[in-house]
Image: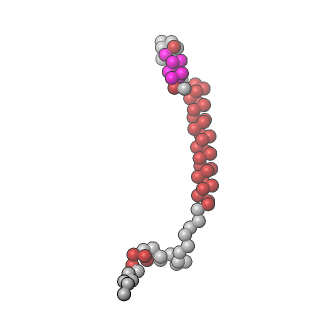
């Protein structure tokens, strides 16, 4: 697709200094916007499926594994 755009740009007259994005620029931005909407919807759907891990209700369970005494086999 980019080769076609480059070929069309090379074939057109280069005497004009007016550079406008035109319809192709609008279509590219519109397609990126639509893709972004679908990606955000998918991300929200996947994030809703995640459940928090059960832990202590008071929230002081951070780092308890590291502070627990190590049992040695006897």
Q: Nearer the viewer, residue 51 or 13?
A: 51
Q: Residue at x 58, y 25 (%)?
A: 22
Q: Position of residue 59 (x, y in %)?
A: 50, 75
> Quick one: which residue is furthest to the bottom in this view?
74
Instruction: Examine the rendered structure and indicate whether residue 2 appears above or below residue 66.
Output: above
> Quick one: which residue is furthest to the front in this view?
74
Q: Nearer the viewer, residue 2 or 73?
A: 73
Q: Residue at x 48, y 14 (%)?
A: 14
Q: Quadrant of residue 30?
A: top right
The colour scheme applied to this rendered structure is secondary structure
Rendered-image quadrant of the N terminus: top right
Magenta stretch secondary structure, dominant: helix
Q: Nearer the viewer, residue 68 or 26?
A: 68
Instruction: Examine the rendered structure and indicate whether residue 42 appears above or below residue 9.
Output: below
Q: Is residue 16 magenta?
A: no
Q: Quadrant of residue 25?
A: top right
Q: Residue at x 62, y 40 (%)?
A: 34
Instruction: Examine the rendered structure and indicate whether residue 50 appears above or below residue 59.
Output: above
Q: Position of residue 8 (x, y in %)?
A: 53, 18
Q: Position of residue 48 (x, y in %)?
A: 61, 59
Q: Which residues are magenta?
A: 3-10
Rendered-image quadrant of the C terminus: bottom left
Instruction: Examine the rendered structure and indicate whether residue 5 appears above or below residue 61.
Output: above
Q: Position of residue 72 (x, y in %)?
A: 36, 83
Q: Residue at x 58, y 52 (%)?
A: 43
Q: Count the marks.
A: 0
């Amino acid at each position: 697709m980019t080769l076609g755009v480059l070929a069309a740009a090379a074939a057109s007259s280069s005497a004009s200094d007016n550079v406008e994005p035109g319809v192709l620029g609008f279509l590219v931005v519109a397609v990126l916007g639509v893709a972004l909407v679908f990606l955000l919807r998918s991300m929200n759907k996947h994030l809703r499926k995640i459940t928090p891990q059960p832990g202590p209700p008071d929230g002081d369970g951070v780092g308890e594994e590291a502070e627990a005494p190590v049992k040695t086999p006897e």
